[in-house]
Image (tube, helix red, strand yellow):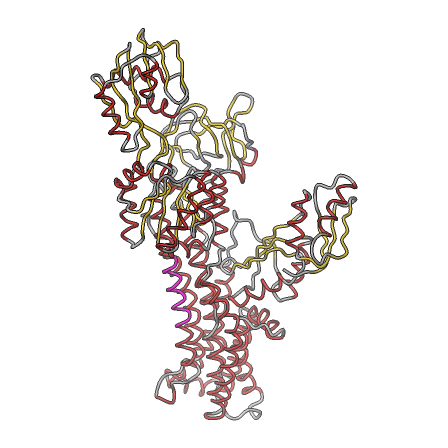
Amino acid sequence: MTQGSLSFAISGLNCASCVGRAEAALQALPGAQNVRVNLADHSARIAGVDPDAAVKALAAAGYPAKVTQVRWEIPNMSCASCVGRIEAAAQALPGVLKAEARLPTHEIYADVLGDPEALRAALADAGYAPRDAVPEAAPIDSAQPLFRRFVLAALLTLPVFVMEMGGHLVPALHHWIAATIGMGTSHTIQLVLTGLVLAGPGAGFFRRGVPGLLKARPDMDALVALGAGAAFLFSALAVLAPGVLPPAGVYFEAAAVIVTLILMGRWLEARAKGHTGDAVRRLLGLRPDTAEVERDGTFADVPLSEVQVGDLLRVRPGGRIAVDGEVISGETHIDEAMLTGEPIPVFKRTGDPVSAGTLATTGSLIYRATHVGRDTVLARITALTEAAQAARLPVEALVNRITAWFVPVVLVIATLAFAIWWALAGLGPAVVAGVSVLIIACPCAMGLATPMSIMVGTGRAAELGVLFHKGAALQRLQDARVIAFDKTGTLTVGTPAVTDMAAGDPKGMLRLAAGVEQHSEHPIARAIIAAAEAVPSDAADFAATPGQGATATVEGKHVVIGNPDMLAQAGIRPSKTWLAQSQNWSETGATPIHVAVDGVHVGVIAVSDQIRTGAAQTIARIRATGRTVAMISGDAQSTADHVAGQLGIDTVVGNVRPDGKVAALEGLRAEYGPVAFVGDGINDAPALAAADVGLAVNGANDAAIEAADVVMMSPEPGAVLRALDISAATLRNIRQNLGWAFGYNALLIPVAAGLLVPFGGPQLSPPLAALAMALSSVFVVTNALRLRGKGQT
C-alpha cells in the first residue's frame, strides 16, 4: 500500500466533538499530515500514512471509514506476468487497501478507501482497462466469441496454408500454382489473406501486446504480436520490395497459422475454464427463485428476495428449503448432501433447524425463517468457496518470481537465436528461429498451473462439505504430521444417551425414571426420556436437587433418581450390587444414574456420550497415511484413555482445561511436527487458531469457525478424511501442472531456437510452436478439471 494524500467518507459523525475525536485519532498516526475531518459531507482527508492504519485508527475511535469493494473484469489479463503488473499498478495507488488479480476468471477484487474510479484509471493507464463484472448468476461466456474468431481465422488461413505448405508436401501442386496463377500472384494472395487474419481475428494480440511492448511491460500477447508480426512483415517486404532483403522465402503461413492455432487454444481453454466455476454455480443454483410464504393467512409464492426473518414458509415433498429456518410443524427427511457431503437424508421435525438449498424428500414442513440472503449457511458456503478459489498458496511465490522475469528472458533468447542464425545461415532461418522461440515460450501454462487446480479443487471440496476458509490451508494440511481431535462433539456425538441398564425390570425402571425426568431440562433427563418407550403422564410433586438428582410421584409410586448421595438423603440404603456396577461404568466414562422406587434401590442407568459412527475407521485410515492421531480431552485421564482405546488412538492428553489445549498442541508440535486440530466448541477457538491448521466441524460456533482454516459442514469424523484427500489430490494436480509447464518450456525453447540442428536434431517451425503452446495451456486446464471427479472418502 502506498502512502499519499487520501480523501474518503466516514460514518458516525454527528457533532463537532465527533470531528475532534476523529481528527485526533488520525493525527496520532506516525507521519500524519494535512488531517481534516468535515462534518458537512462526512469526509476525512489525510496524507503521509498507510491507508490501512488510517482505517484501523478510525474504526477504533468509533468512526469507521467507508471502504468500497470492487470486482472488475480485465479481459486482457492473459498470463501470470499480467497478474503481477495489475496488482503492482493497483497497490501503487494511495487508498487501495487490498488488490487481488485472479487469472482464471480474468478479474480483480480490490478494497478501496476513497473513489474507486481512481483505481480504474490507474489500471487503464497500465494497459489493463477494467470493466464491470457480470454477476455470478450470469457467468461470462468467453468461449463463443473466441470460437467465431477461430473459425474466421481458420477459413482465411486454409488457402494460405494450402498454397504454401501444400506446394512443399505435393510438388505437383506447386508446379500447378506456378503454371496457372504464378508464384508472385500466389504470394500476393497469401499477403492479403494473412493481413486479414492479423487485422481481423488476430487484432487483439496487437491491440494488447504492442502497448505492453512500448511501455516495457511485455506479456504473452506481446510475444504473439512480435512473432506473428515479424513473420508477416518480413514476408510482406520480400513480396513488395524484393530487392531490399537478401533472397529468402516467405512465411505468411507461419503468421496466419500462429494466430489461428493460438485462437484455437484459447477457445479450448475458455471452454474448459467454463467448467472450473461449476461448483459455485451449482451452489448458487440450489437457491429457489421463489418461496411459499404465508401472507394474510394463506401461502403464496413470492420472490426469494422478499422473504424476511420471522416469515413462515412451506416446503412440499421434492421442494428446496428457501432460507435457513426452524421447523414449526410437519416431518420429513431432508437431503443435505449438497451442503454436508453426507448422502443419508436427515429426519427433521418440530424444533429442528433447516438450511437453505437442502431438499425435502418425503413430507411437507412449515418453518420460520431465521436467516435470509447473505446470512444463510448456503450463502456463507458460497462466499467461502469463492474466497478459497482465489487463494494464493506458498508454492505460487516461486512461480510468480519466475514468470516476472520469464518474458524478458524469452525476448533475449529470441534475439540471440535470430542473430546467431542470421550470421550462420541467413535471414530466412533466423526469422524461423526467432519467431519459434517467441511463440513456444508464452507462459500461459505457468500462470494457470496453480490457480486452476485451486479453483477446481476447492470447488469440489465444497461439494463434499469441506470449506477451505483460509486458502493456504490447502497446502499446510498436507504438511501436518499430527491430527489432534477434541473429544466431546468431535469424536463423540456431544449429547448424552442411555447406553446400559442394570435392574430386575430394566424397562419398568426406565419408564418410571422418565416420568420423573419429564419435568427437567437437564441433558441427562432428555437422554432418559428419549430412551423410554413411553413416558407416564401421571407424575406429581417433582423436586430437583442441583448436582444430585430429583424426586417425583409417578403412578402413585415415590421415585428417587440421582447419585448415591441423593438416595442417602432420602433415607434409602444403596444396593452393593448396583453400586459395584456403577463403579465399573464410571471407569469407562459413563455417568451412573441410580433409581429407587418406594424406598428400594431397584437399579442403575448408564448415560454416556456416544462415539460417532465411523470414528474408529477414520482414525485407522488417518494413521495409515503415516500421521499420528492424538486426542485432547477435559475428561479424567482414565475416561479419555478408555475412549481412545475404543478408537485406536495412542496419544491421549486428558484433564485438559480449555485454556490448556494450546499448550497441549505445542507439546505435540514439539514432539511430532506440524499439527492440525479438529474441534467444535467456543473453548476450541484458541486451539484452532494456534494449530498449524484448524478444522472446525459442523455445529461449531462462529468464534470457532472464524478461528479455523477449514470448516467441515458434516459433524462426522470422515469429513477430516475428505479434507485430507482433496488437499492431497489438489497439491498433486498442482505439481503435475507445474512439472508440465516448466518442463515444456525447458525442453522446447532450445529446440525452437535450433540448438539441436547442428547435431542432426529437429527444429520446431513457428506453426508447430504455436500448436504446442496452445495445447500446453489446454493440458493444464483439463488436467485441473480431473479434480471434479474426485469422489467422497
Occupied quadrant, residue 735: bottom left
Does the magenta segment cover residue 742?
Answer: yes
The x and y percentages for residue 5 are: 72, 58
Residue 7, placed above or below residue 425: above
Tell whether 238 sits left or right of 528.
Answer: right
The residue that appears at 37% across and 51% down in the rendered structure is: 668
> Residue 500, percent across and down?
25, 26
Magenta stretch, main secondary structure class: helix
Is residue 649 toward the left or the right of residue 128 in the image? left
**Going 74% across and 50% down the picture, which residue do you hit?**
44
Nearest the eye: 646 or 476: 646
* Residue 785, x across and y down, in percent: 39, 57
Asked if 243 appears above or below 497 in the picture, the reply is below
Residue 85 point in image, percent of width and height? 58, 66
Q: Is residue 790 left or right of residue 68?
A: left
Q: Quadrant of the N terminus?
A: bottom right
Does 615 lie within the magenta span? no
For image coordinates 47% across by 47% down, the residue present is: 689
Front residue of 645 and 510 = 645
Residue occupying the far top of the picture: 556
The answer to whether residue 151 is visible is no
Q: Is residue 49 visible?
A: yes
* Residue 731 occupies quadrant: bottom left
Tell which of 647 and 234 is nearer to you. Answer: 647
- Please give the range of residues in magenta: 730-743
Kindly identify the residue that appears in the image at 31 percent across and 53 percent down. 627
